[in-house]
Image: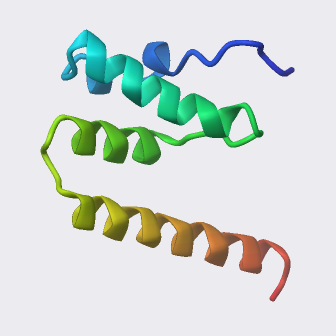
Amino acid sequence: MFESQMKIEQQYPDLFAQLDDKLCRAVVQSLAAGWHEGWEPTREDVENLTDYARGAIDADEYDRRSDAAACRAAEVARRAAGL
């Protein structure tokens, strides 16, 4: 069932607890942009973005983590397709 609202803050309250209101809104808006297109963010996706937003990691580390996650997802898809 498709929900009309993303409730990502309720799914991962520990990750959002580390952010002030302004950063929290920015992260939710960033995640919602993809969610409205059918993307379901994982805990790893949310953790990476909240880490970046609060300054725990820099842009290079965020990109490295995102690339690694994309490679893992592509490998899972290839295996599922029997390739």
- Residue 61 place in picture, x, y as percent: 24, 64
Task: State the image quarter where residue 77 is shown.
Answer: bottom right
Q: Position of residue 53 (x, y in %)?
A: 25, 37
Q: Residue at x 41, y 47 (%)?
A: 44
Q: Residue at x 18, y 57 (%)?
A: 58
* Residue 72 placement: quadrant: bottom right
Residue 33 rendering spot, x and y as whole percentages: 62, 34
**Colour basis:** rainbow
- How many labels sit on residues? 0
Frontmost residue, 42 versus 33 = 33
Picture coordinates of residue 27, whole percent (x, y): 40, 29
Residue 78, by quadrant, is bottom right
Which of the image's four quarters has the N terminus? top right
- Judged left or right of residue 36, residue 34 is left
- The reply, left or right, for residue 23 in relation to residue 41 is left
Query: What's the residue at 83%, 21% (across, down)?
Result: 2
Image point (47%, 64%), residue name: 69
| Residue, far bottom | 83
**Horizontal placement of 7 versus 52: left or right?**
right
59 vs 21: above or below: below
Q: Looking at the picture, does residue 31 appear above or below residue 66?
A: above
**Quarter occupied by the C terminus:** bottom right
Position of 19 relative to 55 (above/below): above
Residue furthest toward the left? 56
Q: Please name whichever residue, 43 or 58, is drawn nearer the observer in this view of the structure.
A: 58
